[in-house]
Image (cartoon, rainbow, N blue to C red):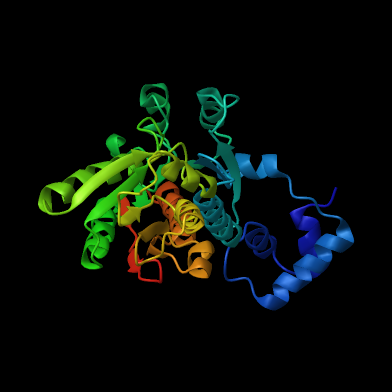
């Protein structure tokens, strides 16, 4: 089997230069890169990952813990983490916690055996007591304010202030009877809890606005019909709906129009995240740069693993309110 030294002899380059190229380090000229790539093909070189891990102590693999890859938020997050990982020469192992088949041991095995260099957590791990002792001293970055109670390094937007900004926008547009939608209180998502607190805070500050909350089973498009089904008398007693996602906002739009409710004259709808669907349907929303959050989370984790203690514990990403036709 060909080795690094075989490639060096074949190309006339130093073994150090070949090693830098194979390990994804900068400062290898384009000409040298092309020469090494040709030699790899000609000699049939296959990297020995086990030997590399033993030498460097790094697997160049990161575990990403999410709730559900089918959800638009998490698919965008995976895309961001994956883009940064490819650029920085790392692989990602996606752990999806939704479903009965997943249990703490699946993540703990990666940590205990050091099969990954670090973990990005974008879903609440509950109960934390089953994980905390193992993960507290392991390179870890949270995303989207998951595990906010554990005081861990994180990358997130300010969900409290963004929720208040959204409610202020609806109020400024004339809404006085606002329905705020949320998923189940046991939903493994810290941002859900933060938004519920922000709904209450806004209600206390604006006594002339009626703020009601309603639980939905999920924040996907088909759950829009679920909202209207809760009001069987016929009339919908609200003039605005604050949704936890753009998919849910789109479902509300579809259900409202089916009932002849004019948007935004009779009902204003505000989404969250600013997925492509929101722009297509003209949904006002809170722009949360999810892909950027994923990229920054991966970069932050690698910085924490290579030079611990020299970087900020948490990074807050800017959001903005997007005003479109639905409000």
Residue 136, position as x, y percentages in the image: 36, 32
> Which residue is at the front of the view, 274 or 46?
274
* In the image, farthest residue toward the bottom: 31
Identify whether 291 is placed above or below 102.
below
Is 28 on the left or on the right of 266, as rendered? right
Question: Does any portion of residue 311 appear in the rendered image?
Answer: no
Q: Residue at x 28, y 59 (%)?
A: 166
Is 225 on the left or on the right of 164, as rendered? right
Quarter of the rendering containing residue 182: top left
Q: Residue at x 51, y 56 (%)?
A: 258
Q: Residue at x 28, y 35 (%)?
A: 149
Q: Residue at x 38, y 48 (%)?
A: 144
Is 98 on the left or on the right of 1, as rendered? left
Identify whether 219 is placed above or below 240.
above
Q: Quadrant of the C terminus?
A: bottom left
> Which residue is at the front of the view, 235 or 63?
235
Residue 138, position as x, y percentages in the image: 42, 35
> Which residue is at the front of the view, 215 or 311?
215
Is 114 on the left or on the right of 124, as rendered? right
Residue 276, position as x, y percentages in the image: 53, 65
Quarter of the rendering containing residue 7: bottom right
Question: Does any portion of residue 205 appear in the rendered image?
Answer: yes
> Which residue is at the front of the view, 275 or 308?
275
Residue 315, position as x, y percentages in the image: 32, 56
Quarter of the rendering containing residue 93: top right
């Amino acid at each position: 089997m060909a080795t690094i030294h075989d490639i060096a002899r074949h190309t006339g380059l130093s073994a150090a230069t070949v090693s830098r190229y194979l390990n994804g380090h900068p400062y290898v000229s384009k000409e040298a890169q092309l020469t090494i790539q040709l030699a790899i093909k000609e000699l049939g070189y296959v990297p020995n990952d086990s030997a590399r891990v033993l030498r460097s102590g790094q697997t160049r693999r990161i575990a990403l813990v999410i709730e559900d890859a089918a959800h638009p938020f998490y698919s965008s997050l995976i895309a961001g983490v994956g883009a940064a990982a490819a650029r920085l020469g790392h692989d990602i192992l996606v752990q999806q916690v939704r479903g009965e088949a997943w249990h703490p041991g699946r993540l703990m095995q990666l940590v205990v055996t050091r099969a990954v260099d670090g973990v990005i957590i974008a879903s609440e791990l509950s109960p934390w007591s089953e994980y905390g002792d193992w993960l507290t001293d392991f390179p870890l970055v949270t995303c989207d304010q998951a595990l906010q109670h554990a005081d861990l390094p994180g990358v997130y937007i300010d969900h409290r202030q963004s929720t208040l900004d959204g409610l202020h926008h609806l109020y400024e547009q004339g809404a006085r009877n606002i329905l705020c939608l949320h998923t189940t209180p046991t939903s493994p998502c810290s941002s859900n809890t933060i938004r519920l607190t922000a709904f209450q805070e806004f209600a206390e500050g604006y006594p002339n606005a009626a703020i009601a909350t309603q639980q939905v089973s999920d924040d996907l498009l088909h759950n829009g019909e679920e909202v209207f089904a809760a009001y069987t008398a016929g009339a919908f007693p609200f003039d605005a709906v604050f949704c936890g996602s753009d998919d849910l906002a789109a479902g509300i739009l579809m259900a409202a129009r089916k009932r002849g409710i004019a948007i935004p004259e009779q009902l204003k709808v505000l989404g969250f995240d600013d997925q492509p669907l929101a722009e297509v349907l003209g949904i006002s929303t809170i722009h949360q740069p999810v892909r950027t959050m994923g990229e920054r989370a991966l970069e932050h984790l690698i910085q924490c693993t290579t030079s611990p203690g020299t970087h900020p514990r948490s990074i807050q990403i800017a959001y903005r309110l997007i005003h479109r036709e639905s409000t």
